[in-house]
Image: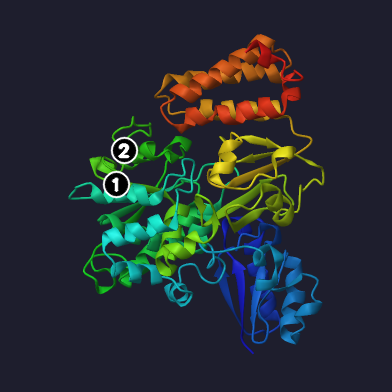
Amino acid sequence: MTMTVYISQDTTAVAVGAERVASAFVQAAQDADSNYTLVRNGSRGAFGLEPLVEIETADRGRVAFGPVSPGDVPSLVKSMADSKFDSHPNYLGPVSDIPWLANQTRITFKRCGEGDPVDLANYRALGGYRGLERAISLTPQAIVDEIKVSGLRGRGGAAFPTGIKWQTVLDTQGEQKYIVCNADEGDSGTFADRLLMEADPYQLIEGMTISGLAVGATKGFIYLRSEYPRAQKMLERAIEVATAEGYLGADLCGSGQRFDLEVRMGAGSYICGEETALLNSLEGKRGVVRAKPPLPAIEGLFGKPTVVNNVLTLASVSSILADGGAEYARHGVDRSKGTMPLQLAGNIKNGGLIEVPFGVSLSQVINEWGAGTRSGRPVRAVQVGGPLGAYLSRDQLDVPLTYEALTELGGMLGHGGIVVFDDSVDMAKQAHFAMDFCAKESCGKCTPCRIGAVRGREVLDRVCDNTASSNDLILLRDLCETMEQASLCAMGGLTPLPVKSAMDNFPEDFGVTDNQYEVAV
């Protein structure tokens, strides 16, 4: 009997031994004279179970084993030959029954882990390109209207309504328009973009193609983080296949419409995650922030109307067009519509990626999917939204994960990164990390960010050395206010967020009690 075995080639899976498991599997199967097909799929995001081995069976569907080490492989091959999967110590049961996956609402990531990421036939068999085929039959305005109905907002810091941005580009006259995907995923604790590009690159390609049809753009660029060589390989191969099969190029699906796509590698700069710095970098210039107006939607890449969205935003588009904007909007709450991929990192027992509707509480995410801290100690702080997100205390963890609820707490959802800290963390040092990060990554164009972060780091040096005075804390507050109000972009404007939240929620770590420095302010 021939079986199909799936072992992930995702970067995280490889980092914890997937390549060694795959090699051991090939050798053990040869030794046992076992007949099977090995497929290197993408990860499902359950990193606590990697290396994950999945076996397609005739009677139970796909069953999973994990985490699997090379030493587990010979017994696993034997259990395959004997069809006695249940008795293996690494047996997890049918993939669809694993609680980590069963309790999610996967829309954007529903195909991740299902097969070879660059197998176009597999993508189509799983419902891929239904969205593009529908979009070709619609007018540009009808496509934009579908995005508006969905309530899709940018899956980044600003959370700007995607349909409004696209409408601006559609309404702006221009002989040439561009679609730019911001894949420069540099936030600490985030990896959703990478996982999707490595596990389901056609999802992003299809979404970008639809966006091109929506606004009249014939050229797209994926600006990819330089530290993602595996994603680059997947994307470039998928673009090559899609072009050969008529899903990119001069005649999209025989419609006579054109859309070309290419990957451009970033230069290792965090600030190039800011859309105007990214556009400068794409043009071959230094990655510094541009003043607004003009907006990129009106004068973007090479001065032309440009849609700039990140990976998660554009990847959501294909599902919206395939199933309808109203179906997507059925998930979520209030103005936070659809689903949000959340990334669990830091001191967490079960790290990885989950996709859930907006409105799930932060505590539920940490406890139900994350299973608490890896150390077993109590949670003390959680940072949501990347290195510029606020630090939330234990009594704030019941907050629903929506854009509005986190804003009310003085935080942000950002790219969906969640980094957990136990009660051993020093929050003054975490505040220092935020200022130090900004000082190192600032493009240097505006004074509040360039100088303010350096002065803030110096103050926090004294706080961490226990040599700070009450006047230092007053100065730090003033610096934060200046950076918030006067910085040119969100890099400087948001850096005070983690600093102020650490001071407000954990004042004891700053050498004061009862927020006594507030009186002086």
Mark 1 or 2, nearer chain start: 1
Circle 1 residue? 168
Q: Residue visible at 30% across and 62% down?
A: 142
Residue contact between numbered discs 1 and 2, judged by CB atoms under 8 Å: yes
Task: For label 1, count other residues whose C-alpha is less than 10 Å away and answer few (under 14), some (14-19) or many (20+).
Answer: some
Place of residue 505 in the rendered image (x, y in percent of width and height, measured from the top left):
70, 29
Question: Helix, strand, or loop for circle 2?
Answer: loop
Q: CA distance from mark 1 to mark 2?
A: 10 Å
Q: Is residue 78 above or below residue 103?
A: below
Q: Residue visible at 25% across and 57% down?
A: 218
Residue closest to the far front: 334
Q: Amino acid at mark 1?
A: Thr
Query: Can you tell which of label 1 and label 2 is closer to the viewer?
Result: 1
Q: Which is nearer the eye, 84 or 298?
A: 298
Q: Residue visible at 61% across and 27% down?
A: 499
Place of residue 23 in the rendered image (x, y in percent of width and height, measured from the top left):
64, 68
Task: For label 2, count other residues whose C-alpha is less than 10 Å away and answer few (under 14), some (14-19) or many (20+).
Answer: some
Q: Which is nearer the eye, 20 or 219?
A: 219
Residue closest to the far left: 175
Q: Quadrant of the N terminus?
A: bottom right
Determine if residue 463 is in view: yes
Q: Residue visible at 29% across and 46% down?
A: 168
Lateral position of residue 120 relative to residue 360, left or right: left
Q: Which is nearer the eye, 431 or 118?
A: 431
Place of residue 446 in the rendered image (x, y in percent of width and height, measured from the top left):
41, 22
Circle 2 residue? 295
Q: Amino acid at mark 2?
A: Leu
Determine if residue 441 is in view: no
